[in-house]
Structures are given as C-alpha cells and as structure tokens.
Amino acid sequence: MELSPRYDPKLVEEKWYQTWKNRGDFRPHGDTGRASFTIVMPPPNVTGVLHLGHALNTTWQDILIRFHRMLGDNTLWVPGTDHAGIHTQMKVDELIRSRGQDRRAMGREAFLAEVWRWKEQYGNIILDQIAKLGASVDWERVRFTLDEGLSRAVTEVFVRLYEEGLIYRGHYITNWCVSCRTALSDIEVEHEEEPGQLTYIRYPLTTGEGAIVVATTRPETMLGDTAVAVHPEDSRWQAFIGKTVRVPLIGREIPVVADAYVDPAFGTGAVKVTPAHDPNDFQIGLRHQLPQIKVIGEDGNMTEEAGRFRGLTREEARRAVLEALNAEGAIERQEAISHAVGHCEKCGSVIEPLLSLQWFVRIKPLAEPAIEAVRTGAIRFVPERFEKIYMNWMENLHDWCVSRQIWWGHRIPAYYCDACGETVVAREAPAACPRCQGPMRQDEDVLDTWFSSALWPFSTLGWPEVTPDLETYYPTSVLSTGYDIIFFWVARMIMQGIHFTGQKPFGTVLLHGLVRDKEGRKMSKSLGNGVDPLAVIEKYGADALRIALVLGSAPGNDYRWSWERFEAGSHFANKVYNAIRFVRLNLDGPVDTERASRHPADRWIWYRLNQAIHQVTRDLHRFEFGQAARAIYDFFWDDYCDWYIEMAKIRLKSDDPASRDDARSTLVAVAERALALLHPFMPFLTEELWQALAPRNGTLMTSAWPEALTERGDEAAEAVFQAVAGAVRASRNLRAELTLPPSQRVHWVWMADDEGTWALWQALAPEAAELIKAETLDFRIRGQGEKPAQAISGVSLGGAVYLPLAGLVDIQRERERTRKALDDTERELERIQKRLADGNFVARAPQEVVDKTRQQAEELEARLERLRERWEALA
C-alpha cells in the first residue's frame, strides 16, 4: 500500500471506519474464557449534538476499549441514546407551535407520533457524530431508553419497587417548573446566587395587643400562610406561642406555633409558614396539622385562593402585594440581600416549590448497599477524592420524586378506578377494576428520565431476562462520565444495579472534568467561547482532535482547550505520517522484523521503545491517559523521528548490505510496535500507516498489544546515546549562536574528560558527524590532546565541544560583537541585581514577580559566563 505525498485525514478516516465496521471488528472477538471488559456508553440525549465534553469522554472510552481489545480481552462497548423526556418534548413542542398547532389540542397519541417521527429523523445525529471520532462501539447492540426491551425493564423495576413498598404516591412539596409544567428532583435544580430583598412584615395579634414581625423574601406567598412559627426556646416570642395573628391583606386568623426548626438568628426569629409552597414549611405544617393553601398554580399564576391577586403572575403578584402592604402600613422595613435561587436545569426558569400529587422512591433502603459497595472498595472512584463527595451526598438523601407531568417517556404503570378509587400497579394493563369490575385509566404521568437511565448498565444487556450478554458482560468494567453527574446518574445506577441484580453495575467510576476555554471559563452560548468538535475534525482530522484532547488531560481535572492544541495535534499527525512514509520509501521489499542488530543506535531505539511500552501500558491500566499519550508522543517525535531516523539515514546510504538491512529491519519493527502503542489515541492514522509497512490479513485494531522485549534493549546502548546526544545538542547550540546555514559543513573538536566518554562517542562516530553537519570531527581526550585555539565551546556530558572559528568568521568582528554583548549583559545584570538588593521591592512586590526577577539574574549570570569564555577563546 503506497502512501500519498501528504497526509489527508479526509481520505483516511471514513475509509478505515467503514472497513472496521464491515469486517465486524467492533464486535467482541476475545477469548470467552478470558475476563470480559465492558463499557456501556453514557447515553447522550437524542436532542444533543457533539460537544467537546462528549468528545473527551468518548475518546477516553475508545482508548480503553481499543487497549483492552488489543490485550485480547473479551471486549464490548455498548452504544445508545437517552429519550431525554423534557428536552425532547420541549423541542418538538416548539416545532409544532411554529406550525400553528397546539400539543394539548392534538392530544397525547398524535403528539407522541410527532415525537417518534422527529426521533427517527434527528435522534441518531449525535451517534453519527460520535462515529466520526472513531468510536469503536458495537453498532449491532445500539440501545435506546424507549426500546421495547428497555421499557419492559423500566416497568419491571417500578412494579417490583412498588410491591416491596419502596415506591409510594402522595401530596408533597416538589420542585415545580412553571415553564416545563412538571415536577423535578432536587438534583435537576441549579441554584444561582442572586440579589434579593428581605421584607419585614407586621402580623397583628387578633387581640389587638401588638404584632409579631416576620421576614420573607417571597411576600406573594403570604397569601397562603397558615401559621407563624418561632423557636420554642426563643425568649423574645415565648409570650406569643399559642396566640393567633391575622395575615395582612386577607385577614386570615392563624396560630403562632413553636417549632425547633426555626432559626432564631434569621430575621426576627419569627417565620411565616406556607405549607403548600415551601418544603420546610410543609414539614412544620405536618407536625402542627396546619391547612395547606395553594395560592400559586402550576402555570406560575396566582390561584383563586389568592383573592384579589388571582390571575397575576408570580412576579406581578410580588409587586402588587408589596404595594398593598405599604399602603396598609404593614411593612416595618426592607433590606437588600443575596440569596440562592433555584432554577430549572432544563429551561432556566425559577423553580416554584409546590404541593402536588407525585410518585416517590424511598431512597434509604436502596442507598445503604450502594454506600457499602464504595466503602468496601467493590466500586472505586477515579480520582479517589470523589468518594467523599459521593458518600456525603448518599448519606443525606431525600426520597426521589420520579413522576413527571409530560407525555414523552415511560408512562407510569399505575391504573386508577374512578368508580371505587382502587389503584393497581401492574406489568400489564388490567382489563377491569379488580374490586368493582369497572373501567380503569392509566396514570397520565411519565417517569423521570433518570429512572430509566439508572438501569442502563443491565437493561442494555437484556435484563430482566437472563441473556448470554448479561451473563458474560455484567457487571461492566468502567463507567466513564463527568464528575458533575455523580448524583444525577452514577449514584442511581449503583443503587438500582445492586438492588435488582445483586451485583455492582461497574467496578470503576472514571470521572472527567469540564472542558473550558483557554481562560478557564465554562463554555456557553452567551460568551461565544464554544467550539464544535466537527469543525475541528473538518479542519484537522479526528486523530488530531483526539490527541489534543488527551494530552494534558487527567481524571477529575478540568481541561482547557485552544486552537493551538488542535494545531499541535495536526503537526504531530503529519510528523508521524512523514516519518513512516520515509521508512516506506526506503523499503525495496519485505524486511525481516525479527532480525537482531547489535548496532548501538538500533539497540538504543529498542531500549527506548521498551520503556515506552512499559509506561503506556502501566498508565492506561491506571487511567492516566494524558501521561500515556505523552509517553508515546515523546517517543515518536523525539526518539524515533528526530534521533533514530536521522541516525539511520547514514546506514541506509551505506555500501554494506548488512548494515542497510539492520537499519531497515529496526525502522520497520520499531514503527509497527510504536504504531500499535499509538493506535488507541490516533486510530485512523495508525491503521493507515501500519497497513502501509507490510501486507496484512487483519487490522491493527484487532492485532495484539505490543509486549516489551527487554532483551532487545540495554543500558549500555542508552549510555552511548546520552553521551552522543549531549554533545550533538551542545554542538547544535554553537551553530545556532553563529547562525551558520544548515548546509554548511565545519570542523569540530570533541574533547572527552576521560577514555570512557571518548569510547561512547566513538560508538556512533559516523552518526554524530552527520547530525552536526561536520566536515571533520576530531575526537580527543583531555590531557592527551590540545584544546583548539580561537574556538567557541559548549559543555556536554563527560566533555566539551569546540568549534574553531579560524576561516569560519571574521575574528576581529566577532571579538567586537562579543565585547558589546558582554558590556550589555553586564549592565543589564547590574540593573537586575540593584532591584533585588532593594528591600522594599523584595518585601512588597508579588512573590511571582520577585521569583521571575531572580530567574532573570541567574540567566544573565550564565550568559555572562558563556560570553567571557568566548572572549577569552577569541583573544
């Protein structure tokens, strides 16, 4: 297979993805006798499109899957999407409204038909985009949370929990979104700090003997007050307990009750109690058997119970109530405050705590085994620090509201008889009421989307049936997801997985951070700082995007992106491509990749490759993707391309056939293994290049992971290379100082401190001479040969390098130039040293400024030393 003169990802990526897919390479092919390695992809929303967070997480998962596939494990990666109940309903609702239609006028069945049509047309877009990243998922096992099998699992879980007494229905305060018109769980509410106003209102005693003052941030809810509460030990209000007051504006007579929940330090120590509009007030109301008066409706407007304020929005009612209270003289004072306000995670509307009839899951019995699984290490978090966050949250859970007042989703399998009030929860719809034989209607609500996705690790493998996939691939191995949904999803999967299968759903929870812009800001439409991964792929290719995302990434840490990172990824892809193309162009037939060479350069590159294999393998097992990527990146760029290929070029031109064959064999054998190491990170590029090196029957992605061959590398070869490389670097620095043209050949003297270094240099003498573009290279031992006159020098490991200047430069002009540089450097150093001697500067300047100034002084001192040596050499 020939390689084109330049690398074009567009010609490579689609070709190889379809080849892998058509060959069935994405399916499990490991030995079923080996332990399985399974990942279920966190299901993206069907409404979603690929963003950099998806790209990072998908790349991490694909690296693991490709790595374990090459290790020979029985590897499975299950893809799928989530129906995203509220998001999808909102999107389709907007669509039909744009056509002049109304969802409620259409009716449930007609609307759901519209949603299914939309899903079939657009719902798999994100999976197609994930494929462009190179995700090696088993496309024959694609799952959707509303698939028939997964829906059956949801029904089975709901019914079993109900039968076990772990699901119940009742009127409770829930987080209500007046825009989405549905209840939300606590973790679907985002709290944002906002400016507010604390209003102090006088509630007059019914006896006319004074008033009790309460403070509130929500004066509109006072219309639903049914008590005033004080702390039982607050001496200020002891005399008021048991008395009654009147609610301003409406005149309702309500009691003053004593309750330990009240914080005496808040406001006046007396609080209004609105059981239908505050979760804490709801609990106070239960303890004191208070009425529940609902003055705000599900649409966010005031109800009939609000009297003259009925029909107003919440915001309008707040302004009107404050105006009326002022007119009545009931406001004692107001003060500005900052407080946390809950917003809907879906649409951003301010949440209304509202009394409503909902279904709940009892969390505590489910949480205890899930806590124990993490405490005992059966499930571990990477990074480990997130275990504490998980534990703290799990030990303080409230019951989970799982009903949602929308149409798109898993409809709750509860049936009601209007004739006799019977409720039936069943796997199949009952033909008639079991008590009175009358007709039954199904609950209108659907289940929270997270209810079905909590079953994802086992429902995707066939549960509740005992399928071969479930027996082989469950528990799954790794869950890779963002740390921001530990509570949304991770905790719920652990609870449900243990409860319904008796086993943990996964062994490791691998958490990635947020992808932020280069200033560290969260990406948002308002800031305009987002980036489309598909635009990156279009410009640079998927491999460049993948390696750029992985380099520098670490579990649990946020990641900062920049276009420069993607450009660097593209440069690396081209570097590797050009290196292998050079190797390919120097092959005149098959090579024996098992050929053993004793040449020091060959032994050294094998030594470095073995190190890279050890490090990449170790780091991938530890989920240190950034470190693993850096190891293979540095090996390819520095060791293989910049050093070994340049040294091998000399022998490829040799008249010695054995030397040429040794070089070719090593070039190919090392490249094949290095491409295999790089494959999980850059699958398309590596497959293309691996196939080009030799005829193949299979693919790189299904080949074996390289094993370190310690006998093909040694410390002696490393010592030779380090000695020569140090001298080469010093020599190249001198060429750069004199700005010599790259093609100009010059005379060099390398003077070793001892015979040991001299012998190491001699081992790669031809390569060293070529690397520094030497006309001649004279090796000497200090004390046994003279130091060249009028030469500039550089220090190397175990010796020094000299570049004689006679005939190379104008000595007098160089002396003048060096003298001027010496004077300028001395003046600058004196200025910096005076600054550091100033006690005020050292004491008052920021530490980083002081440290930077000291570093400048050290650099100037080193430069001054080099210039003095040059001045003496030119004398």
Image: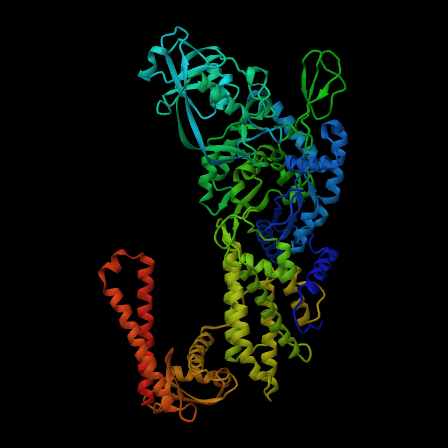
Report the number of numbered marks: 0
Res 666 visible: yes
Tell me: 415 left or right of 766. right
Q: Is residue 43 above or below residue 219?
A: below
Q: 283 above or below 768?
A: above
Quadrant of the drawing holding the C terminus = bottom left
Please provide percent x and percent y for residue 700. 66, 63
Q: Nearer the viewer, residue 432 or 837?
A: 837
Q: Quadrant of the N terminus?
A: bottom right
118 with respect to 238 (left or right): right
Pinpoint residue 782: horizontal percent, then vertical percent. Answer: 34, 87
**What colour scheme was applied to this rendering of the protein?**
rainbow
Between 469 and 833, the residue placed more toward the observer is 833
In the rendered image, the residue lying farthest to the front is 327
Residue 837: name its quadrant.
bottom left
Residue 33: x percent and y percent?
A: 64, 50
Q: Is residue 479 visible?
A: no
* Spot occupied by residue 395 in the image (x, y as percentages of width and height): 46, 32
| Residue at (70, 48) in percent of width and height | 125
Q: Seen in the image, is 308 located left or right of residue 795?
A: right
Residue that protrudes farthest toward the top in the picture: 207
Q: Quadrant of residue 681?
A: bottom right
Q: Quadrant of residue 737?
A: bottom left
Up-down relation of residue 316 to residue 242 (above or below) = below
Q: Is residue 619 above or below residue 385?
A: below
